[in-house]
Amino acid sequence: MKNLSPNAVKEKLEFDKSSICFIDVRSEDEFRSGHVPGAICVPLDSIENSSAKIPADKLVILSCQSGKRSAKASELLRQRGYSNIVEMEGGYSAWSGSGLPVNRLRKSIPIIRQVMITAGSLVFCGSLLGIFFHNAFFAIPVFVGAGLIFAGISGWCGLAFLLEKMPWNRA
């Protein structure tokens, strides 16, 4: 079966929800900020470990933000023997952009934006403190920059991990 448009997915979900398993492979943070009603969150980085929970006897519809992660998830599941996989074209962006209904579990700013705000603030303040008070404050932007480089290379961001634990980010 080829990929389905958001409207085709909506029709399928309305027609026969019991024979469909809709999986959103975005992060839990992205999922909480808005998702397709009836979707379950199985982040791409845990899809291999969760594949045993994905029903083989149902049509599995995969979605992410724009389509790249769902394509990777589709490939991983096909390697595990699933043949009942389709992807929603354009992902959640296309779904919400079409004016289709969404569920929101929280209203806070997405973690990636919180990381950018926090890192930018630390770099800005550390630089100002270094210029106007003492050179030792330049260690702050250096530390933040090193952390961002490490996050980009490794895919793990300590600041994002910390921010996810903050009370405003809890479901």
Image: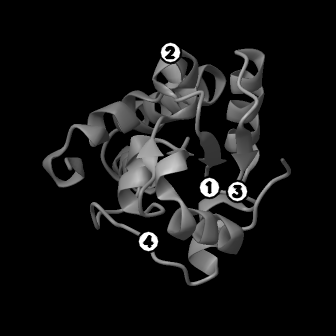
Tag 1 residue: 65
Circles 1, 2 touching at the beta carbon (< 8 Å): no
Circle 4 packing at 10 Å, graded few (<14), some (14-19), many (20+), is some
* Disc 3 residue type (three-letter): Met
Between residues 123 and 75, which one lies in front from this camera angle? Answer: 75
In this view, the residue farthest toward the right is 2
Circles 1, 3 touching at the beta carbon (< 8 Å): no
Tag 4 residue: 102
Q: Residue at x 59, y 70 (%)?
A: 10
Sequence order check, earlier mark of 1 and 4? 1
Q: Secondary structure at mark 1?
A: loop
Sequence order check, earlier mark of 3 and 2? 2
- Dot label at residue 88: 3
Sequence order check, earlier mark of 1 and 2? 2
Sequence order check, earlier mark of 3 and 4? 3
Which is more foreground, mark 1 or mark 4? Answer: 4
* Disc 1 residue type (three-letter): Gln
Q: Is residue 79 above or below residue 23?
A: above
Residue 135 screen position, x and y as percent: 40, 36
Residue 105 screen position, x and y as percent: 28, 60
Tag 2 residue: 49
Circle 1 packing at 10 Å, graded few (<14), some (14-19), many (20+), is many
Q: Secondary structure at mark 3?
A: loop
Q: Secondary structure at mark 4?
A: loop
Sequence order check, earlier mark of 1 and 3? 1
* Disc 4 residue type (three-letter): Val
Compute the Cα span from label 1 to label 3: 10 Å
Circles 4, 2 touching at the beta carbon (< 8 Å): no
Circle 2 packing at 10 Å, graded few (<14), some (14-19), many (20+), is few
